Image (tube, rainbow, N blue to C red):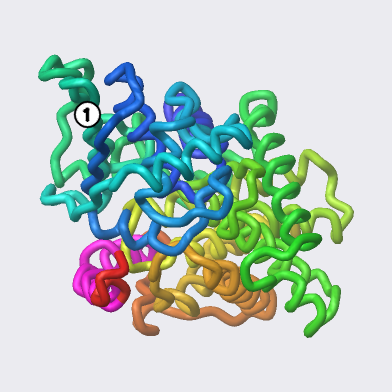
Amino acid sequence: MEKRIYDEYVAILKEELVCAMGCTEPIAVAYCAALARKALGALPERVSVAASSNIIKNVKSVVVPNTGGARGIAAAAAAGVVAGNADAQLEVLSSVTADEIEQMRAYLDAHDIAVSASEKPFVFDIQVRVEAGGHEASCEIAGSHTNVIFLEHDGEVLQKKEFSAEDEGDGTTTDRSLLGVDQIVEFAGIVDLADVSETLERQISCNTAIAKAGMEGDWGANIGSILLDAYGDEVHNRAKAWAAAGSDARMGGCELPVVINSGSGNQGITASVPVIVYADQLGSTHEELLRALVVSNLVTIHLKTGIGRLSAYCGATSAGAGAAAGICYLMGGREREVAHTVVNAIAVDSGMICDGAKASCAAKIASAVEAGLLGLQMQQHGSEFYGGDGIVVKGVENTIHAVGVLAHDGMRETDRTIINLMCGSGAC
């Protein structure tokens, strides 16, 4: 493998697999608000937030961690300005104390945080403006969760980055055009694990912990425990159940961190937990697990690259296919077997929509993992979908491209319809 590609794959994993606490969209709102408050240098007397419709969709129904169960953009912004640590990025609310939660509640009671739709043409856009004592500051994040494109105080520009609608979903520094299923599998087999082990060990530790919390606690719709009670403890079901349980805990406001993938904690959980469950069942070595996680994470990122950070296409679909690719690798599959598994998986489940972050995400994760495992079983039984079967195109890379076009371009009107349905009552 060329050194340039090897180095870029290592960089992609380190760039994408980072810790976040809570659903990443409300956390991004809190981070933007914390940056604005830091620039202002005082607790704001007035706060206004403008957000793109996809941000509104994903923040509307999910619990913001360390807020005492509060939901929505106003709660996320209040948490950021009252108690957020702007230096912690996606762990901006990780050190909030009980006293600060009470302060945040009092702040919400005393201040009317204005929330409006962004007028920018970005799918991902958050703007926070704060004012106090005749001074003001503002911050804007666009494209991805920590991509700060503008920060100012009293008209003085503190930070500015050029960004356009054509950059949408980018906000990253690595070259995703180098990703391909054949080279991902090759990389997984040759990578010096010292280059990626810290990143992957953190993913194993964090995502297993929140899945365990989801199984043991009363979170969301309790999809994980329901799956085990209804269908038993076979590994096929356990992989779905533990991934769903992690999402239930996360959507329900669990304060444990998650290692994300493609900007999403749910996708980070889905890409990793089923692979971890299967590795335990198969008696795989720890090295085999790490290499399989390389496959699952990079396949997920590869699928998501053409789709973009936010769309009407449920990102768990990509992560479920990635997990199946990793499990296939654990079982001895290589480029051909992984490619067929990925095509089969995304052919089955590519109609699943994203209607925001909320409790039902756990059930969608279970469905995505099921589709991935069915795709794997098809491959193992010599069955596959062929070019011309629906959106499937001959060749795994062509099929991945087709899914990207479907999700990024074809589902734009679907996305608008979903947002109108969700927000038509004015609840957004």
Nearer to us in this view, 69 or 222: 69
Q: From the viewer's perspective, is residue 200 above or below residue 338?
A: above
On-image quarter of the C terminus: bottom left
- Local crowd size for mark 1, using a 10 Å CA cut-off: few (<14), some (14–19), many (≥20): many
Q: Nearer the viewer, residue 73 or 284?
A: 73
Q: Residue at x 63, y 63 (%)?
A: 248
Question: 272 or 375, which lies in front?
Answer: 272
- Percent coordinates x, y for residue 421 in the rendering: 28, 78
Task: Give SS at disc 1.
Answer: strand
Q: Which residue is mark 1?
A: 131
Residue sitting at the far right: 283
Can residue 219 be seen in this snapshot? yes
Residue 262 percent coordinates (x, y)? 45, 47
Q: Quadrant of residue 205?
A: top right
Q: Is residue 95 above or below residue 213?
A: above
At 61% from the left edge and 44% from the top edge, which residue is drawn? Answer: 258
- Residue at 45% x, 43% y: name it: 27
Say whether residue 78 is left or right of residue 143: right
Nearest the viewer among 50 and 308 is 50
- Quadrant assignment, res 251: bottom right
108 to the left or right of 46: right
Label 1 is placed on what type of residue? Glu
Q: Main secondary structure of the magenta part?
A: helix
Q: Is 120 within the magenta?
A: no
Residue 220 at what x, y percent from top left? 62, 67
Asked whether 414 falls inside the magenta stretch, the response is yes
Q: Which residues are magenta?
A: 398-421
